[in-house]
Image: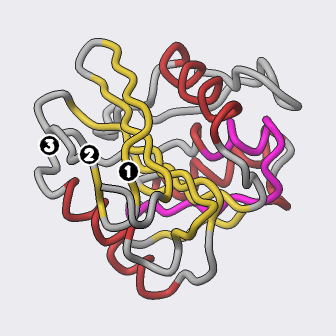
């Protein structure tokens, strides 16, 4: 696994074997960020939920995001994200929150331009979490929500004021992208 483009292009990222994580493949990550470069307008703050290795948030930093917050509940993975931030030279541009996503919703504040969410594929509550995210103070009119999920867990066309604008898929992995669309039906 490596950073695909930007300042840290080609830099390897560490992962943990047997940790139960499923890192986003380089191919799918590349497709997601190519699409984001054409639709996302605010790259100032990025939120990487269920961060795992931190690959999604680090890719955003490499491509010009100013700041990234990483939320991961497993301490071993939190340490790994910090190590990957050091390896790529982005340690001063991010914070790792070692806690559940539910707890993060209650302590993080301010809007993020890009909100990345890659929950475990066995999580049948993905839609509920997306609904909470879309209606939280973390998502605003300039936000783009990116949710990676299993094809067996379809997501809705709308969550609150956010409407699905794109859907990418590769194998069992689907990526649903949402932007603010208040008042549209």
| Magenta segment includes 101 | no
Q: In this view, does 50 lie above or below 60?
A: below
Tag in front: 3 or 1: 1
Name the mark on residue 2: none
Callout 2 secondary element: loop
Can you identify the residue that label 1 sits on?
163
Q: Residue at x 77, y 18 (%)?
A: 10
Q: Residue at x 50, y 87 (%)?
A: 107
Callout 3 secondary element: loop
Q: Which residue is drawn at 53% across and 74% down?
A: 138
What residue span does the magenta drawing correspond to? 57-73
| Magenta segment includes 66 | yes
Callout 1 secondary element: strand
Can you identify the residue that label 3 sits on?
122
Q: Calculate the distance from the C-alpha at mark 3 to the C-alpha at mark 1.
A: 24 Å
In the displayed structure image, the side of residue 121 where residue 74 appears, left or right: right
**Quadrant location of residue 12?**
top right
Can you identify the residue that label 2 sits on?
157
Sooner in the amino-acid sequence: mark 1 or mark 2 = 2
Q: In this view, does 121 lie above or below 103?
A: above
Tag in front: 2 or 3: 2
Sooner in the amino-acid sequence: mark 3 or mark 1 = 3
Mark 2: few/some/many CA within 10 Å (<14, 14-19, 20+): few
The x and y percentages for residue 185 are: 30, 55
């Amino acid at each position: 696994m490596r950073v695909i483009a930007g300042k840290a292009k080609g830099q390897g990222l560490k992962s943990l074997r047997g940790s139960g994580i499923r890192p986003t493949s380089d191919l799918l990550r590349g497709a997601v960020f190519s699409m984001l470069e054409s639709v996302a307008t605010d790259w100032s703050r990025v939120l990487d939920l269920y961060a795992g290795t931190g690959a999604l948030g680090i890719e955003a930093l490499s491509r010009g995001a100013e700041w990234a917050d990483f939320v991961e509940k497993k301490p071993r993975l939190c340490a790994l994200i910090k190590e990957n931030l050091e390896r790529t030279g982005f340690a001063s541009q991010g914070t790792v929150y070692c806690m559940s996503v539910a707890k993060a919703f209650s302590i993080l504040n301010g809007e993020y331009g890009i909100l990345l969410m890659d929950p475990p594929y066995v999580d049948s509550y993905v839609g509920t979490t997306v609904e909470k995210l879309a209606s939280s103070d973390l998502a605003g009119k300039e936000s783009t929500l990116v949710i990676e999920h299993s094809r067996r867990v379809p997501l809705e066309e709308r969550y609150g004021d956010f409407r699905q604008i794109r859907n990418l898929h590769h194998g069992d992995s689907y990526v649903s992208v949402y932007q603010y669309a208040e008042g549209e039906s």
